[in-house]
Amino acid sequence: MEKLGTVTKTDGEFVEVTVHRDSACGENCAACGLCANRDMTVTVKNPGGLCVGDEVRLLAEDKKFLKVSALGYLSLTLLLFLGGIIGAIWGSEWLSFILAILFVFAGVLVLRKLAPDSIEIKIEKLR
C-alpha cells in the first residue's frame, strides 16, 4: 500500500500525516453520499527531519496490511456472534443484543491497542 500525504503536526518522535482517501464509489460521490470527508490523519514514527508541510509517501506491506485487516474484521464478527449466542443462552433477545454490542466494543478496544504495532509503516520525504 502506498499513499501520499502531508505532515500536519510533529510531536517528538511521531508525526501526523494527512492522507487523502480514495473514493469507494469510483469518484461518483453523488451516488453514494459517503465522500464528505475523505481526509484521514495517520500517526507514524518520525524518521527525523520531517517538518509541518512536508510532502511524504507512506508505505506498508500489502500482504501484512490485508492480513491484519482480515483478522480484525473476522475477530469482530466472531465476537458479535459469540456475544449474541451467550446472551441467547442466558436470557432474552435484549440480553443477546446487549452482549453482542459489548463484545464488539471490547474487541475494538483490544484491536486499537494491538493494531498500531502490527503494521510497520515506512515514511519517505518527497521533496
Image (spheres, helix red, strand yellow):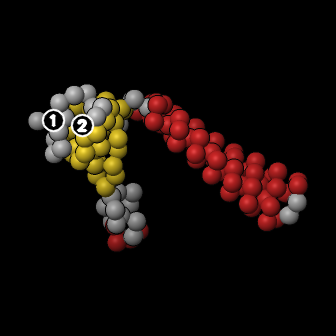
Q: Residue at x 63, y 45 (%)?
A: 107
Query: From the viewer's perspective, is residue 24 above or below residue 31?
Result: above
Q: Quadrant of residue 101?
A: bottom right
Residue at the outermost right position: 90
In the rendered structure, the answer to whether residue 48 lies left or right of residue 103 reads left
Q: Which mark is residue 57?
A: 2
Amino acid under disc 1: Leu
Helix, strand or loop at label 2? It is: strand
Residue 26 visible at all: no
Closer to the chain start, of discs 1 and 2, is: 2
Rendered position, 104 above or below 115: below
Residue drawn at (85%, 57%), measured in percent from left and top? 88
> Which residue sits at x=34%, y=62%?
37
- Does dot 1 land on a helix, a strand or a loop? loop
Q: Is residue 103 visible?
A: yes
Q: Quadrant of the N terminus?
A: top left
Is 37 on the left-hand or right-hand side of 93? left
